Image (spheres, rainbow, N blue to C red):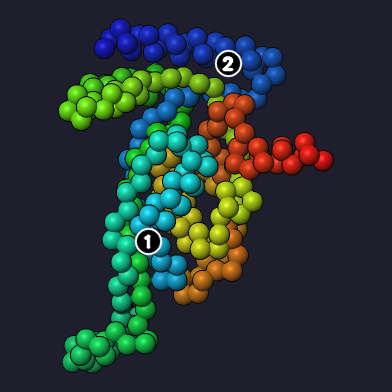
Amino acid sequence: MRRRFCRSISALAGVLGALAFNCAAGAQDEVAAVFKAHELRFVYRSLVNPLDCGKLGNHVAGILRAVGARDDIKVQVTNCDLFLSPDEDPDWDSWDRASPLDRFGPGRERMQMSNVRVELMFPVEATAAVLAEIDKDKSRRELISRVTGNPLAALNDPIIFPTQRKEVTLSRSTIRLMPGDCELLEQMLPTVFRKLNVKVVSRQLSCDPHQRSNFAPKVVVETLWPVGLPGPGEQKKEKEEEKK
């Protein structure tokens, strides 16, 4: 393990040296990065835009890939059934005396509260502390690989690559966000995005907890992005410009 860690540090020193040369040649603030494993959880709450588990999971994965998550992201969603809630200020004496049908009459609201669990690899700055943490986790990955018979579980050794702090736009035109994604994004920004150190630069959210939004959300974030890789929507824009 000590030898592996020393090799990682040597690789980091080599990449940092190359980045220093590139910066001297005019590159802008390149950062050596590695993919690090994260496990995140949050609860999706909605009164107006219920989503089945599969669709909700796909939306979460698509948003996280757009801000830099590796393609092998895993999203598990449970409790997608709706339940009926009482009025915000009910008469609890009447509520206790009422029959079940009366309790959940036309005036009651349907709510979705789904548990979302995400496992992903996300770029972080390749500091010595981060490399040491990843190397320390290797024995656990090798054990999982032997127990499950999955050789890929042991292959997440740190690969250092150059990145930049890049502004990425999440919108209808870049990743096909729909008005119904407003609540989901609003809830992911202070939870998932914050834990991944994805900084919100600007936001256009018209979410109403009691009425479906008519406008697709638009959020601009700053995240670590591989140098030379097109951001969401940029490849499509380049092709359109080539056709002109």
Task: Give the mark nearest the N terminus, 1 or 2.
Answer: 2
**Distance of label 1 from label 2 (alpha carbons):** 45 Å
Q: Amino acid at mark 1?
A: Asp
Question: Is residue 179 visible from the viewing direction of this image?
Answer: yes
Please state which of residues 226 and 200 is positioned toward the viewer in this rendering: 226
Q: Quadrant of the N terminus?
A: top left
Q: Quadrant of the C terminus?
A: top right
Residue at 42 percent across and 56 percent down: it is 55
Residue at 39 percent across and 39 percent down: it is 73
| Picture quadrant of residue 225 | top right
The number of discs equals 2
Packing grade of label 1 (10 A; few <14, some 14-19, many >=20) is some
Q: Which circle marks residue 145 in the picture?
A: none
Residue at 53 percent across and 33 percent down: it is 224
Residue at 38 percent across and 30 percent down: it is 36
Residue 17 coordinates in the image, percent (x, y): 55, 10
Question: Is residue 133 visible from the viewing direction of this image?
Answer: no
Judging by the rendered image, the residue that carries numbered circle 2 is 19
Packing grade of label 2 (10 A; few <14, some 14-19, many >=20) is many
| Picture quadrant of residue 84 | bottom left
Q: Amino acid at mark 2?
A: Leu
Residue 9 coordinates in the image, percent (x, y): 40, 12
Judging by the rendered image, the residue that carries numbered circle 1 is 52
Considering only vertical position in the picture, is 205 above or below 25? below
Q: Secondary structure beneath disc 2?
A: helix
